[in-house]
Amino acid sequence: MKHNPSTQQSTQKPNSFFNGKNPFVRYPNKASARGAPVQVPHGLASRDQASPSFPGGDSVQAPRVPASRDQASLSSAQRDTTAHSPKPMPAVQAHASPSSPRATVNQDGILKFLLDMKYARKSQLLKRFGDNDQTRSEIGQLLRAGYIKSKDRDLTARSLLIPTLEGYKHIQAGAKGLLLAEPVKRVFDPMVRHDLILGDIRLRFEELNFIKKWNSEEMLKVVPGFAKLMRDLPDAMCERNDGNSYFLELEISQKSRKVYEDRVEEYKAILEMDEIKAQGINGVIFLCTDPKVLETLKSVTPRNTKAFSVLPITRYLKDFILEEVGA
């Protein structure tokens, strides 16, 4: 995906990828110009869970969908937030000022999720944070505080909720130096469908316990130096419970064969970088909504490597309907 120029001007202090002191980057004592590995930040209210089997697919160990959704569901008591995971960074704390209401931890979690994903439908927030009166009330409080906005006067399940600059500043004030994805200045209509499908994929992967951590394109944009490694950032970087990670690309429209060839060649080079290898990033998964796109991508990806997987989106969203995404 190409860089979207729609983010607000950063209010975070600039930090060099190679010699800065960002808490999310592990720096060796004597880091060379290209020797300091990328460390992607932990998210607020992350859904770290006990490590399940993460069986290999035909490539890049693509996650396998369990026989039933019930088998994949885990209660909060069953989640192990420490197994096979590094020591988590401090979570964003709720912050209040005389001119703003005190936000609950769950409200901060909703804000952080919206910043990560650019925006989401109300139904997606209810699915992730609980389909109950409390979550609905907290969404309403965030709207009244001006921390999120919607063009709909009366919210429905399909209403698009967007974080505001005030919401970003509210989270940032309590973040104590943690990196945060920045709010979008405007919503580009051609990208909404793509972004909402991506949100559904994240929710599904978390529901099935496929991933320990999801780092969105918006978050990768603010990781110092990460954008310099890649011409176009991936839609997401997912960390599995075993510590290995992969890039995720969602393709919903047909592009020329040359575009796909160039993208695959770029990923080949990226996966050979020391900075990428040091973080256990060992592959790319392309998820496709269109069978023609699927076949084109399969024809341009190497067959003798496990670094690339090209899969239909219905592998994970079996009831997927493009026009009803996020409903």
Image (cartoon, rainbow, N blue to C red):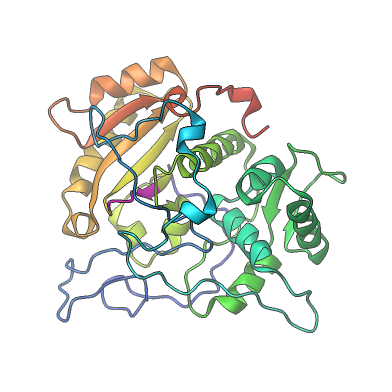
Residue at the bottom extreme, as displayed: 98
Quadrant the N terminus occupies? top left
Of 65 and 59, which appears nearest the observer?
A: 65
Provide residue 105's location: percent of width, then percent of height: 64, 68
Provide residue 282's location: percent of width, then percent of height: 22, 46
Q: Where, by quadrant of the figure, is residue 29 drawn?
A: bottom left
Placement of 171 over or under 241, stated as above or below: below
Quadrant the C terminus occupies? top right
Placement of 246 over or under 143, stated as above or below: above
Residue at the left extreme, as displayed: 304
* Residue 266 shows up from this direction: yes
Placement of 2 over or under 116, stated as above or below: above
Of 13 and 42, which appears nearest the observer?
A: 42
- Count of labels in the image: 0
Left or right of 261: which side holds 210? right
* Residue 218 shows up from this direction: no
Residue at the front extreme, as displayed: 77
Provide residue 63's location: percent of width, then percent of height: 34, 35
Left or right of 234: which side holds 275? left
Tell me the residue at 32%/66% (across/down): 86
Q: Which residues are magenta?
A: 237-242
Provide residue 51's location: percent of width, then percent of height: 34, 50
Look at the image and say whether residue 228 sits in the magenta stretch: no
Tell me the residue at 55%/74% (across/down): 11
Placement of 102 over or under 64, stated as above or below: below
Q: Where, by quadrant of the figure, is residue 227 drawn?
A: bottom left
